Image (cartoon, helix red, strand yellow):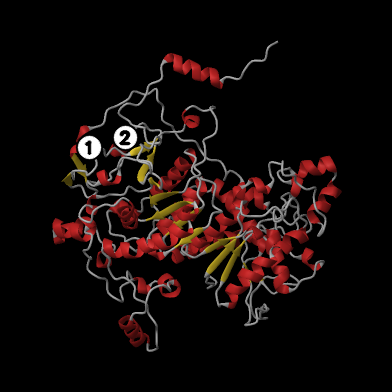
Amino acid sequence: EGGYKVDVVFTSRLKRAIRSAFLLLQEYGEVYLPVFKSWRLNERMYGALTGLSKTETAEMLGAELVQEWRGSLRSRPPALTPADQFYPGRDRRHADLSPDQLPLTESLLDCMERTKPVWLDKISYEIACGKNVLVVAHANTLRGLVKIIDGIGDDEIQDIAIPTGIPLVYNFDSDLNPIPPTSDQKTVSQVHMKGIFLEKPGLLKQAIKREVEWCANVPDYEKVMSRSTKSAMSPLQRSLSKLQAQREVQDYAAQFADEGADEEEDDGTDGKLTLVEQDEDKVWEKGLDEITDGEYFDPDHAKFDEDSAVKDKTILSDGDEEELIAPIYTANEPCVTAMPAAMAVPGLGPVPVKREALIVMIRHGKTENNKLGLFTGWDDVPLANDGVVEAKEAGKLLKLHGFEFDAVYTSWLTRAIETAWYVMDEMDCLWLPIIKSWRLNERMYGDLTGLSKAMVKQRHGEEQFMAWRRGYAVNPPPVSSFSPQYPGNDIRYTKYLKDVRISISETLIRSIESKKFSLHRKLPKSESLKDCMDRTIPFFTEQIMPEAINKGKRVLIASSENAIRGLLMHLCEIPEDKIAGLEIPNGLPLIFDMNSKCIKLLDDGSGVDPLEKYNFGASAGYLFRPCQNPDGSADDTCDFTFSDAPVLTASDKEFIESIRKPVEANV
């Protein structure tokens, strides 16, 4: 609404800040923007007070002492020890920090001083390059940035409060000096500061409280206020519509506002200030770390035999039957990694973490376009509710099997980014770096984008339809230069894409149309699978492999069907004339083992054969080759099959129960 644009985002490594940044970018409709996560923007380290109740601690040690630790500029709470459960060195998100960098306790001044390098080395550089920067962090680290920007003294900074959830905007001149607001601007600011708040903190809090009451008492109020994302509105229209509805509530709440009323909530500013009236930790963390357990495979269930019909034919996603291509391998059963014993039989111990280098590929969860059978390509549609569930279930399954990642790669398309984010959220690794590249985008379907696949098949015939949809070197009809589907009309590609050569013809067309010189790059108007691979495979071999895999890192790649088909064609050596028969299910983790050079699936505990549950197409035999170690021996982690699943005997179950029961002490 304020017309503010963002080019790059900085946040901390803590979930509440990362979640806030993601939600903001979703409202902007710009989740493709780069997000840098720095430990220097983490909240203050409260030492031995971490995890303790503020009220109970004050009652036990005295309110005056606790308030001094919380509110004094230089006083530090008692320090943690490396043996403490909250010692940051135990957390994998801080594994790259040296012991000297890991704070055991911090004063307010320590916390604010910690932010200096990220301002001097990163944020100020981006601003000097002409970029608009969004920083999503915590009260005390944001106060540290404000202290640097406005040149506020040590004593004066204690008068500054950073309200929760209220944007604070700074404008800078060419020398990076903050520009004070003009007298005619309707602004809310604080003493010592040149930044402006976009909302009045106290009034907004009253509106939120009133909205909670309305949700509880007005029928269907929450449904109306949610403004479903499945409407025809654009992200901007949806955000403005929701904001307008919230403003209506805010205006109503203003008449009930009691600015002098006493508040019971913690103000989030260490007891010195009163603008923030909600405890940030409680607001953002309550319930977010709980992961609901799924239903796991029970070996006591009756075993079943493989359905022979699966071997005889494969049902394509368009509803057409196709004869199965004779596989070049003698065995085409998928390698399914068994459910870990500790999960199948709770109480037997922790699941071992996967330490070796590996690649996990996942096609994004379902979108409404997928469900409707539309060509999507570079059209930037979000996940459907079903797709969100698929992504979350994939994250739970990966965590269940002991997977951890060191780096995440995805495209510039919202559905792939959201899938990566939900997987990471379930695995409790939102702090990992996400490298976003347009080279992992879906294939560009040209003038077919947005059209019904059934309609295209009816109009052009099945042979032409299959050539456009699945052909290796066949391009669909190109899109026009001025079509809304042409990526040259999308700001993410015109502003941020730099690694493609200049197009003379498009530059000429754009310059004539705008009546001024306008440089334009050569962006795809249509792509075959080969064209798509010409950008994805070099990115994989020249960046992902040397920067991650060859260094022993565990990598997650969240992308779209054709980008993943191209990667699998490269990794699994699928012939060009057979790749058309390969289907990639939505939301299913595909594990490529770098040692045995094979694709593995994970047992989800349902007891259902993956070939019955998922459609991999007629060329599945090329995907599921026998898994072998580099020395030629069989991969012993790939011995789980559904045709001879073991059944526990009564004595087996009795033995397992005896292990799980605590040992009784002798009297």
Q: Residue at x 36, y 74 (%)?
A: 488
**Horizontal relation, residue 565 to residue 150: left or right:** left
* CB atoms of marks 2 and 1 within 8 Å: yes
Give the crowd class for mark 1: few <14, some 14-19, many >=20 residues within 10 Å. some
Query: Does 8 sit above or below residue 221?
Result: below
Under tag 2, what secondary structure?
loop
Q: Residue at x 47, y 41 (%)?
A: 396
Q: Given the image, on which type of amino acid does mark 1 rest? A: Val
Of residues 179 and 351, the one drawn nearer to the viewer in this rendering: 351
Q: Residue at x 41, y 27 (%)?
A: 298
| Corner quadrant of residue 369 | bottom left
Quarter of the figure with the C terminus: top right
Residue 56, x across and y down, in percent: 77, 41
Q: Given the image, on which type of amino acid does mark 2 rest? A: Asp
What is the C-alpha distance between the residues marked 2 and 1? 11 Å
Q: Would you name the residue on which mark 1 appears?
A: 310
